[in-house]
Amino acid sequence: MQKITILIHCKDQKAIIATVTTFIAKVEGNITYIDQHVDVEQNVFFMRLECEFTNPDTTLEGFKADFEQNIASTFDMSWDLYNQEQKPKMALFVSKYDHCLFDILGRYSAGELNVEIPVIISNHNDLRSIAERFDIPFHCVPFTKDIKEEGEARQIELLEKYQINFIVLARYMQIITPNLISLYKNRIINIHHSFLPAFPGAKPYHSAFKRGVKIIGATSHYVTAELDEGPIIEQDIARVSHIHSVDDFIMKGRDLERIVLARAIKLHAERKTMVYSNKTVVFS
Amino acid sequence: MQKITILIHCKDQKAIIATVTTFIAKVEGNITYIDQHVDVEQNVFFMRLECEFTNPDTTLEGFKADFEQNIASTFDMSWDLYNQEQKPKMALFVSKYDHCLFDILGRYSAGELNVEIPVIISNHNDLRSIAERFDIPFHCVPFTKDIKEEGEARQIELLEKYQINFIVLARYMQIITPNLISLYKNRIINIHHSFLPAFPGAKPYHSAFKRGVKIIGATSHYVTAELDEGPIIEQDIARVSHIHSVDDFIMKGRDLERIVLARAIKLHAERKTMVYSNKTVVFS
Amino acid sequence: MQKITILIHCKDQKAIIATVTTFIAKVEGNITYIDQHVDVEQNVFFMRLECEFTNPDTTLEGFKADFEQNIASTFDMSWDLYNQEQKPKMALFVSKYDHCLFDILGRYSAGELNVEIPVIISNHNDLRSIAERFDIPFHCVPFTKDIKEEGEARQIELLEKYQINFIVLARYMQIITPNLISLYKNRIINIHHSFLPAFPGAKPYHSAFKRGVKIIGATSHYVTAELDEGPIIEQDIARVSHIHSVDDFIMKGRDLERIVLARAIKLHAERKTMVYSNKTVVFS
Amino acid sequence: MQKITILIHCKDQKAIIATVTTFIAKVEGNITYIDQHVDVEQNVFFMRLECEFTNPDTTLEGFKADFEQNIASTFDMSWDLYNQEQKPKMALFVSKYDHCLFDILGRYSAGELNVEIPVIISNHNDLRSIAERFDIPFHCVPFTKDIKEEGEARQIELLEKYQINFIVLARYMQIITPNLISLYKNRIINIHHSFLPAFPGAKPYHSAFKRGVKIIGATSHYVTAELDEGPIIEQDIARVSHIHSVDDFIMKGRDLERIVLARAIKLHAERKTMVYSNKTVVFS
C-alpha cells in the first residue's frame, strides 16, 4: 500500500478542499491526515495531506500526472508529493562544537529521526572521531574567506555524491555561500543560539548576559542570504537570573540548541514545514 | 452576512470532508475555518467549521434543515450549529475566593470574553460588593448538605430565569448536584488547583507541598458526577522549589487558576471544545 | 516586634557576611531571610536581609545609626532599610488600554499586592470610570509633545501630593520626561509588549508577526532615558504559530503583559530588586 | 589552591551563619558561594558553601577536624565536605531503552557532566554495543524475581569494584532491592516518565492518554523503598493535545526524560541537593 504526503500552496480560492478531497476519494485514496491554513492577509492557501492508496494498481506516477492535470493546473498550485517510504538524506555540517552532533547522532541511532545521514562535513578535523564512533563518513572541507570557491566546490561535490536532500548546520561556524543557499533553497537548517530577532550574529549569549535578560533562547531557521534572517522553524527558551554567568548561559543554551534543532530536523524530515514570505507554516 | 460555527462528530467514514465541503460550496457558504480530527483508536471523526453565507436568501433554518437531511443523516452525525452573533450566556458560581472573579470580570469589562454574564450565584454574601461594582446581578443561594434540594431548586430557577447556556465555577466551594450536572452536561466548567490527576479533592497545594513537587498546576475541566474526574479542557503549571512555603504555592497558584480558567471560558464560548470518552477535542 | 528589610551593595570584600550577621546577632536581631550575590565580573557584593528585633528597646533610628557607623561605613556600603509595616505608595499611569489596569486593581482589591495605590494618572479620560469603580482618585493630565512642560509639572505635583514612592506605567502611551525619570530613578516600572531586546519601540506584535517568530513575549523593566533599554525585571513568553493573526498575538500578549507587570510590581514592592550596570539582581 | 564544597544541616539556631562564615574567614578560606535555607515548619537549617583556601598549609584533614570540633559539634550539625577536584563515580543501570543512555554518554563525552562513568550495568545485552562505542565497561547482570539475590550480589560486587558513589537508573526496568537502596541511600537517581505523583507505576503515558491530560511530564527522584515515592529532584513538562497519540506522548516524553534526568545528574554531581522529610533542597 502506497503512502504519500502532499504539500500544496496556491492563491486562496473557493472549493479547493472540496475539490482535492473529492479527487482523492475518487482514486481510492484514504486520507489519514489533512490540515490546511489560509493566510488571510496575503490570500494564500496551504494544505498538507497524507493518504494511502488501497488499490494496488495506483502508481505514484499515474497519480501525479492525474493530479497535476485535473487539480493542480486548475487552481494554479505549487505542490510536492513525497513517498513516505523514502527517507530524506541529510548532510550534517559541523565545526568544533560537539553537543548538537552527539545529540543528533544519538537520536539517529535510537531511531528517532526519519532520515538517512550519509555524510558529515566539517571545516575542521576535531569531530572526526565522533563520526567514526557512529560509522558515518566524515569529510574535512577546509573553508575560509580565502578559499571560499574551492570549499564550496568541494561541498557541492560531496552533496551530489551522497545525493543529499537537505543540510543541517549543527553549530557550523562558517558562512554558507549564496550559491549553495540557492541550490538548497529552504533546505538548509541552522540553529542560532538566541531567540531571534534578538541577538543575531556572533556571541549572542555574551550579548544576552550584558543586556541582563531574564530569558535566553535558541532558534532554528532556514538559511537565507541574510545572516540569521531566514524563516523561523522553531524556538524555545529557558529562564536565567542574575546568579547565572555567561558560562551558565552557554551551558543552559546547549540544551536549548539541541532540542530546538532536533525538533526542526524532525519537522522538515516529516515534510511538515512550508515556507512563504520569509515565514514558515508548520503543520502539526 | 450570516456567520456560523458548526461542530460535528460521527463514526469515521470515507469522504466526509469532501461531502461536507462540497455541500457548503453549493449553498454559497464561504468556509473561513475548517479543522478536523480523527480518533484512530475509537474510529470517531470530529470537525469544526466556520462559514459565512454570501447569499442573503440563505436562512439558518433553511440551511439547518438541508444539512440535516442531506448530510448529517447520511453520515449519522451528531452536530450543532451556532450563530456567531449570539453570545452564550454564562453564569458565575462563586464562594469566598475573589481572585478568579476579579479576573473574569476584568476581562469581561475589557471586552475579552465573547459572552454575556447575566448573573452571579454564590453560597455566601462575601463577594456581593464586587458583583455590584461591575453591575452584575448577584444572588446568594445558601447551600449545605442539609438544604441541598432547596439550594439546587433555587439555582435551577435562576439559571432558567437568566436563560443560562453554561456555568463557570470560579472557585465555588460546594458540590454541584447530579441533577444540575445532567441538566448542563459538558456545560459546567470548574477550575481545580492542581495538575490533575495529581492531587484531586481538597487542599491540593498542601498535598503538593508535602510531596515536595517541583511543579504545581491548575486544571480546568467539565464537571461530571465523579469529583475532579471530568474531561480536561486546559492545564498549566508553574515551577516551585524548596524555598516556597504553602502560602507561596497558593499565591503562585492564583495566577495559574486565573489563566487556566480564563482560557477554558474562551475556548468554550467560542465553541472550540468537543467532549467524548471523558476527554476533550480542543480546536485551535 | 519590628520587622525590617535591608538591601546592601558594595565592593566585594572579605568577611562581609560574617561581619553583618554577627552585628545583627549582637543587637538581638533574628534573621528570617538572607540572600547574597557576588557579581564576579564587576566585583560587586549584593545582600538582602530580613530580620525582626525581639528587644522592644531597639528603635529603627538607633539601629540605622549603629549599622551605618559600625558596618556600612567600614565596607563603604550603599544600603537601604525598609520598615516592613510601611507599604510603598504606587501611582498608576495609564492611557486607553484597560487590561493591565483591571488586572492590577483586581489584585489590589484581592489583597495580593503589598502596596497602596493612592492615585491613577492618565493622559486621557477613557479609564476614569474604572478608577471610580475601585474608588481610587483619578487625574487626567494631558500630555503631548507641545505641552510636555505643563504635563510634567502637573505629574510631579500629583506625585508629591500623594507622596508616591514608585510609578507603574500600565500601558501608558506617552514618553516619561528625563526630569521625572531622574526624580524616580529605578522607581518607574514599564511593561513592554515584546521579549526585549527584540522589537523595541512601537507595534512590537506587528513586527513579531511580520518576522514570523514562534514565540512572543513581554518585558517589565525600570524606565531609563533610553527607550526600552532599562534594566529588565521580569520577562515571560507564549508560543504562537502560523495560525495566529496579529490580533491573536495581541490577545495572547495581554495575558503576558498582565502577568509580567504584576510580578514586577510585587518584586519591587517587596524590595526584592536591586539595580546595577543597567541590570537587576532579583532576590527570591 | 584547595577548593571544597560543604553541605550542612541542623536544627535552626541563632547565629549559625555568623559563626560559620567567621570561622571560614579565620582559617583563610575565601567563600565563593554560600546559600542557606530554613524550613520554618520543621525548624531545620540547611547550608551549602563553596570556598577556596589561599593558605597552602591548610589541609583538608586539618580543616575537617577543626570544623567538626569548633563548629559542627557545637550546633549538632550533620555535614559533608567534598573536594571539588574529585569527580564522583557514577554507575549507569539500563535495560533496553537507549535514548537516555545515548543522551548521558553524549553529554559525558562532550564534557558536560562533572562525573566519571566507570561502568554500565544492564539486565540485558541489547545496549552493549553503545557502551562499547563510548569505551565504557558493560556488564550484563540478569535480574528477575527468581534470581534477585544473585542479581543483587553481583550488582553490589560491581559497584564496589568500580568504587561507585552514586547510581543512575536510565530507564532501568527492574526493581532495586531494599538492601541496595539502603547501601546507596539518597544516591540512586531514577527517571519516571510522568509528573509525579500523577501516574506512578507502569505505563504512565498510556494512563495519561486515557485520562486526556493536556500536559505530560517527567520526574527525577531519589529511589526509596516505596516505588516512585522518593524525594523529587527535578520535573519538567510538555504540552499535548487531542491530536497526539500514545506514541506521540512517548516520543515527546523521551525529550523530557533526557533533560530531566540530565539535570538531576548534574545537580547531584555538583552536590547541590540535600534530602530531608522525603523532599529535596536543591541549591542553585
Image: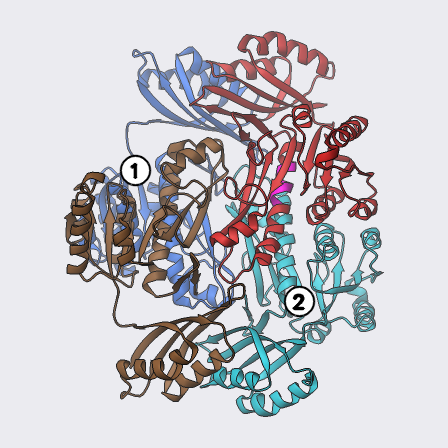
Chain colours: A red, B blue, C brown, D cyan
At a point 50% along the width and 28% down the height, the residue shown is B36
Q: Is residue D38 left or right of residue C59?
A: right
Q: What amino acid is labelled 2 in the image?
A: Ala
Residues drawn in magenta: A259-265
Circle 1: is it few (<14), some (14-19), or many (20+) Cα within 10 Å? some
At a point 72% along the width and 28% down the height, the residue shown is A165
Give residue B165's mark: 1
Residue A263 shown in magenta: yes
Give residue D269's mark: 2
Q: Secondary structure at mark 2?
A: helix
Q: Position of residue C177 (x, y in %)?
A: 26, 49
- Labels 2, 1: front one: 2
Using the rendered image of the protein, determine whether residue D248 is visible from the camera's viewpoint: no
Q: Secondary structure at mark 1?
A: loop
Name the image quarter holding the C terminus of chain D: bottom right
Q: Position of residue C170 (x, y in %)?
A: 29, 48
Q: Foreground: C208 or D106?
A: C208
Circle 2: is it few (<14), some (14-19), or many (20+) Cα within 10 Å? many
